Amino acid sequence: MPKRSRTVVCVVGARPNYMKAAPIVAVLRDSARLSPFLVHTGQHYDPDMNERFFAELGMPAPDANLEVGSGSHAVQTAEVMIRFEPVLDAARDPIVLVVGDVNSTLACALVAAKKGVPVVHVEAGLRSGDRAMPEEINRVLTDQLSDLLFTTERTAAANLAAEGIDAARIHFVGNVMIDTLIANLPRAIAPAATLAVAGFVAPAGFAVSTLHRPSNVDDPAVLRRLLGCLAEIGETLPVVLPLHPRTRARIDAAGLTGLLDGRRILALGPQGYLAMLGLMKSARLVLTDSGGIQEETTALGIPCLTLRDNTERPVTVEFGTNILIGRDPALILAAARDSLATGGKAGRIPEYWDGQAARRIAAVLEERF
Ligand code: UD1
C-alpha cells in the first residue's frame, strides 16, 4: 500500500545546495510519514556545476526542474518564485525545506510562507553581519520566514534570538554537509587523476584555492592582487585553482589569464564533489572565499586561510583549522608562509559534525509533522 504521508518539497538551486540536500532526501525516502519531492530551480545549470554532483552524490533526478538560469538578483529570485508557485500548488500537503543561503533558498521560502505552507530552513542562523553579501540578505529573510530552523553551530541560536526568533523553533542538529563529506571520503578521487585530466603532473605537494565571491572577483584590481598573491605562494608550493565559471570569465575579461601559468598556478575547470574532496584532503593549505570550504577543511583537519573580512561560520575559526585572514596580500603571504613552515593551524571537530545531522533533522520533522 502506498504510504500516506506529507510531501517535503526539498529545494536545491546552486552547487553548494546539493551536498546539503542529498543526505536529507536519502533519509526522507526511508520515512514512513514523509515523502521527499526534489525541486531544482536551475540557478546553476552547467553540467559541471550540476548533473555531475547529482551522479556522484547518488541523488535522484529532480522531480521538477524550474530551469531559471542566470540573471540579476531580482530577475533570478523573481523567476524562481513565479515558476515554483505552480509546483507547490500541485504538491499534496506540502512542507517546504530549503538549505543554505542562495537566491533559490529565499525565493522558495517566500512563496511557501505566503501560502501558509510550513517552511523549514537547514543551516539557519549563520550571520556574517555583512549586508553587502547577497547571501546575508537571503539568510536573514529566510530565517524570518521559517517555522523550523535547523542550526549547524551553537552561535546561530544567539543570532536568531537577537532577531526575535522563538527558541522553540530552533534545533541544533549539526552539519548536513559534513554528513555528505563523511559518507564520501572513501570515494574521494586522487589528486593525481584530477590533475592529469587537465594535463598537469601532480606536484609533490600543493595548495588549493577557490575564489568566486563578487567582492573578490568582480573588481579587476582586487582580482589581480589576489591572483598575484597566489602566484607568489606558487613559487614555493604550486596552487591548484579550480575556477568557478564566473571567476574564469572575470580573469579573461581583466586580461589576467597569463597568471595561470601551469607552474605556480594550476588552473582547472569547476570540479566535481569527489575530485574537490580529494584535492582538499591532500592539500597542505587551502585558501578560499567559500563558506562551505571553510567547514569542509575544518572537518578534514586541513589548514584554511579565508580570504574575506568576515565569516558567518565562526565555529571554524574558534574550534577548527580556519584563519580569517582578509584580502591584504602581505597578510595572506605571511600567513601562508607561517602555515607551511609550522604545519598550519590545528583544530578539532565541532560538536555534532558527526555524520548524523540528517537523521536528527528527519526525527524532528517526523515528530512535528
Ligand atoms: C551562487 C550563490 C553563492 C554560492 C555560489 C556557489 C547566490 C546569491 N549566490 O553564486 O552563495 O556560493 O552560487 O557557486 O545565490 N554561471 C555559469 N554556469 C552555471 C551557473 C552560473 O556559467 O551553471 C555563471 C553565470 O555567468 C552567472 C554567474 O556564474 O551569471 C553567477 O551565477 P549565480 O548563480 O548568479 O551566482 P554564483 O556566483 O554562482
Image (cartoon, rainbow, N blue to C red):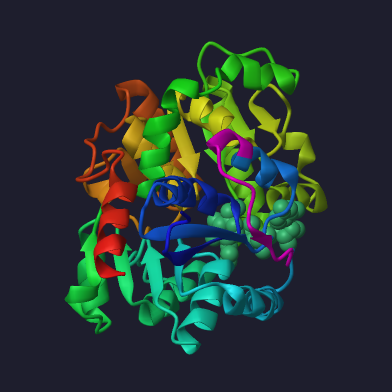
- Residue at the spot 41% in from the left edge and 52% down from the top edge: 28
Q: Position of residue 63 (x, y in %)?
A: 63, 57
Horizontally, residue 322 falls left or right of residue 99, namely left
Instruction: Provide the residue span drawn in magenta.
Output: 55-68
Which of 156 and 184 lies nearest the eye of the viewer?
Answer: 184
**Quadrant position of ligand 1:** bottom right
Q: Is residue 346 shown above or below 361?
A: above
Position of the C terminus, as image quadrant, is bottom left
* Magenta segment includes 202: no
Horizontally, residue 289 falls left or right of residue 177, namely right
Q: How many numbered discs?
A: 0
* Residue 274 visible to an observer of this rendering: yes
- Which quarter of the figure has residue 170? bottom left
Q: Position of residue 117 (x, y in %)?
A: 44, 81
Q: Main secondary structure of the magenta part?
A: loop
Q: Is residue 228 shown above or below 188?
A: below
* Residue 335 visible to an observer of this rendering: no
